[in-house]
Amino acid sequence: MSRFERSSTLRMSLLAFLLTAFVAGCGSGSGGPDQILGTGGAGALDTTRPTVTSTVPAAGATGVALNTSVTASFSEPMDPSTITTGTFTLACPAGTAIAGTVSYASSGNTATFDPASNLPASTDCTATITTGAKDTAGNALASNFVWTFTTGAAPDTTAPTVTSTVPAAGAAGVALNTSVTASFSEPMDPSTITTGTFTLACPAGTAIAGTVSYASSGNTATFDPASNLPASTTCTATITTGARDTAGNALASNFVWTFTTGAAADTTPPIITSRNPANGATGVCLQKRINATFNEAMDPSTITTATFTVQNPDLSFVGGTVSYNATTVRRHVCSNKQSDSQ
């Protein structure tokens, strides 16, 4: 074999080796992520645009306190550097900018606009989050998110209260894999609902690790333990005066309640035990409150307009609100007809 032939063979062998190494590095043969092209598997690029999932005040709200803050929660973690007074603005009325500061709380993926002074009374306000707001992967909102609300005549100086809890105070035999929730009398500032203001100890003095979230739908805070709670133990849940409503009013005092765990985790799915109106009912009032009762305590943060819906014959959704208490989940469907008092 000539020197030229040996050199050509060597180059071809080296080229084949490099191609093999490239294919192996891409992971194309194992279904894993493509590290170079960024496609497939756990290493896939995030191309999903974030959305605004809820706001406080809600769109169309009236009688909003003059000293309120305005918040928006997102569907995924956002890049805090893109949540600014340039991307989150407030005007009362439209065209009249309100001065304020903007902050972002990764707990709850929530942006908050704090006005520098009280909002004008009895005025239509327009809040806007622009496409300059991006998630941590750099994806922007698909379009500007705009909503309006109307202020009331006076500031809010009323302290919020805890109206219900799950588990209830004094409950026994609580499942070890339960979450702990508390519902408030009014919308809260999500940035004040944290592991610093909502804690759990089982028994007293022994802190339980977990995460805290807030759902503006239902004004509900949820403590999710990182692992199962200890069996047959008295637990103490506490919400401190660090928790504040959107007007900055704190709880009058720490809210503390206790419950006792059972011997095992709850793995039984809940069921609906009754409905009103009944299935197949006819002649139902146009503004009937629609109720469903469960056989056990539910996580209020999962009872929302996304999980409890009403549809017209054409499959379009009926507008309304959903609320939850210890015994009933209720959807109030709005219409222009006379209200049904049931």
Image: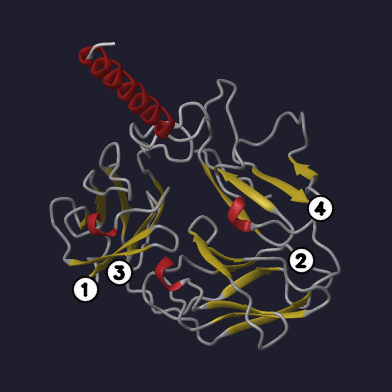
The nearer-to-camera label among 2 and 4 is 2
Upstream in the sequence, badge 1 or badge 2?
1
Q: Residue at x 73, y 39 (%)?
A: 277
The type of residue carrying mark 1 is Ser
- Residue 107 falls left or right of residue 223: left
Q: CA distance from mark 1 to mark 4?
A: 47 Å
Vertical position of residue 16 compared to residue 251: above or below: above
Q: Which mark is residue 295?
A: 4
Q: Residue at x 53, y 87 (%)?
A: 253
* Residue of label 3: 66
Measure the C-alpha gap from mark 1 to mark 2.
Answer: 46 Å
- Alpha-carbon span between mark 1 and mark 3: 9 Å
- Identified by mark 2, the residue type is Leu
Q: Can residue 208 be seen?
A: yes
Disc 1 or 4, which lies upstream in sequence?
1
Residue contact at pointers 1 and 2, CB within 8 angstroms: no
Above or below residue 206? Residue 134 is above
Q: Position of residue 305 (x, y in %)?
A: 55, 44
Residue closest to the eye, 177 or 315: 177
Answer with mark 1 or mark 3, whichever residue precedes in sequence.
Answer: 3
Disc nearest the viewer among 4 and 3: 4
In this figure, which residue is indicated by the disc labeled 1? Answer: 117
Q: SS at mark 3?
A: loop
Dot 4 surroundings within 10 Å: few (below 14), some, or many (20 or more)? few
